[in-house]
Image: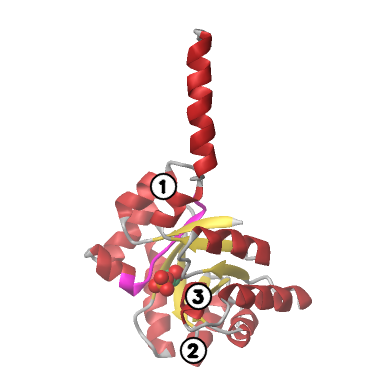
Amino acid sequence: MKFFVDTANVEEIRELMETGLLDGVTTNPSLVAQSGQEFTKTIAEICSITDAPVSAEVAATETEAMIEEGTYLASIAPNVVVKLPLTFDGLRACAHFSRINIKTNLTLCFSANQALLAAKSGATYVSPFIGRVDDINIDGIELIRDIRAIFDNYAFETKILAASIRSVNHVSQSAVAGADVATIPPTVIRKLAHHPLTDKGLKQFVEDWKSTGQTII
Ligand code: E4P
């Protein structure tokens, strides 16, 4: 499974890219607002750090304006993925970008039917929001499983991008359910490597090694 980082914070992205664990970046208007930075400059800066896919979301809600904004965003760098809301207007804009080979990420997906429409419109990625689905007492991971089954039934090439990830368990459960990508907040990425038995075991190894009085080099 690929890992994207879900943030518009350039310094976080730079630092996490250095780990070699990241395969891309997603942003959204809320993350841009949190960063306090100018949107298009931030996207250009992120794309100067990495050639990996960087999702940049349109602000418009009507097809023609989405196409105009998406075309501009895509001109910033070749690795920009135009992020569009999963509405009929967004689907029409998606079909346009698909015809001219501009990559798209259909966001705010909350149902298997919406994901099916995204795939039929030629979306590169569809983003089911598992955390927000869990918030209303519906199983977000079950949604990933359903979309996986549908895409496999019809050999759709659209990638399932598990979004709205809130915990380390969401990451592993999305992988088991067959998501192609998970977009993960930096705090959760940092927690993924942590295990108390690793810490305990390492402490013991360090002590035992010291007791041997040896050095490796
Ligand atoms: C990413 O593409 C989504 O916009 C993001 O994961 C949404 O996360 P949230 O539900 O925590 O805002």
Q: Quadrant of ligand 1?
A: bottom left
Q: In the rendered image, which quarter is residue 39 located in?
A: bottom left
Q: Which residue is mark 2?
A: 87
Q: Which mark is residue 129?
A: 3
On the rendered structure, is 14 left or right of 114? left
Residue 55 placement (x, y as % from top left): 44, 66
- Whether ligand 1 has any atom under 8 Å from the Cβ at mark 3 is answered as yes
Q: Residues within 10 Å of mark 3 (few under 14, many from 20)?
A: many
Q: Amino acid at mark 2?
A: Thr
Q: Amino acid at mark 3?
A: Phe
Q: Residue at x 42, y 41 (%)?
A: 18
Q: Amino acid at mark 1?
A: Leu
In this rendering, the answer to whether 140 lies above or below 208 is: below
Q: Residue at x 49, y 23 (%)?
A: 206
Q: Which mark is residue 16?
A: 1
Q: Residue furthest right?
A: 153
* Secondary structure of residue under mark 3: loop
- Whether ligand 1 has any atom under 8 Å from the Cβ at mark 2 is answered as no
Q: Residue at x 45, y 74 (%)?
A: 83
Q: Which residues are magenta?
A: 22-30
In this rendering, the answer to whether 173 lies above or below 60 is: above
On the rendered structure, is 78 left or right of 41? right
Q: In this rendering, which labeled residue sits more in front, label 1 or label 3?
A: 3
**In terms of depth relative to the viewer, which is nearer, 34 or 126?**
34
